Image (cartoon, helix red, strand yellow):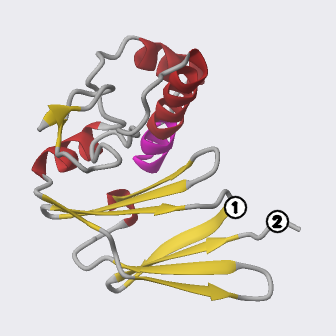
Amino acid sequence: MRGCARCDHVVKKGWQYCPRCGFSLERKDFDMFSLMRNKFKKIDHLIENELEQGNLLQVEDVIEQELELPRNHATSQRSRKMAEKITKIVDPVTRVRRLTKSIVYTLKVPGVKSRKDIQIDTLEKTIEIKAYANHLLYFKVLQMSLPVKRYMLQGNELVIEFKPIG
């Protein structure tokens, strides 16, 4: 076992990503561009979480808060607490449908209770999906970079609709 280079969370050999912060464990070099992209990604999540909770905030306050965070701070207190409880990472069963104006991915995520338990990160060439359920983390990486139109929980399934380009 070793620690994640970004957040120091204990990760097992063979894992490609840290379950707490999503950092690629295969990456050998860590350049300034990656560091800044990760900082802005964290700031984006902080703003989203505050707005979901109905809090009014100023962007300057969130940026200042993020810049002062310690190295092992997770995206939010909620996701950090959930990440600490994770005992198993599961690759969810996935179905893909191509519709006229969208591409729909359906992931089986039993135990996920609300949208607050879901985190979708759009990176440069991939989309990372994390869904927390009790002691499980459903983790899926999609090798594409399409914009997310919307997503919803329908029973034990996470339905994500993407807008195709062109």
Q: Position of residue 107 (x, y in %)?
A: 42, 78
Q: Main secondary structure of the magenta part?
A: helix
User: Upstream in the sequence, badge 2 or badge 1?
Assistant: 1
| Res. 66 image quadrant | top left
At horizontal 34% and vertical 17% (from top left) the residue drawn is: 69
Q: Is residue 30 above or below residue 119?
A: above
Q: Is residue 85 left or right of residue 95?
A: left
Residue 80 placed where, x, y %? Answer: 24, 40
Q: Relative to residue 12, is residue 36 depicted above or below? A: above
Q: Is residue 111 left or right of residue 5?
A: left
Q: Which mark is residue 165?
A: 2
Residue type, label 1: Leu
* Tag 2 and tag 1, C-beta contact below 8 Å: yes
The crowding category of the residue bearing disc 2, from other C-alpha atoms within 10 Å (few below 14, some 14 to 19, many at least 20), is few
Q: Secondary structure at mark 1?
A: loop
Gap in angstroms between the C-alphas marked 2 and 1? 7 Å
Q: Which residues are magenta?
A: 47-55
Q: Indicate the position of residue 129 as horizontal and vertical percent values.
A: 44, 60
Instruction: Please determine whether, in this image, residue 30 is positioned above or below residue 47.
Output: above
Q: Residue at x 64, y 61 (%)?
A: 144
Residue bearing mark 1: 146
What's the amino acid at mark 2?
A: Ile
Q: Quadrant of the C terminus?
A: bottom right
Q: Residue at x 56, y 16 (%)?
A: 32
Quarter of the image for residue 46 reads top left
**Residue 41, x across and y down, in percent:** 52, 34
- Magenta highlight on residue 53: yes
Q: Residue at x 34, y 86 (%)?
A: 155
* Residue 66 included in the magenta stretch of the image: no
| Frontmost residue, 43 versus 58 | 43
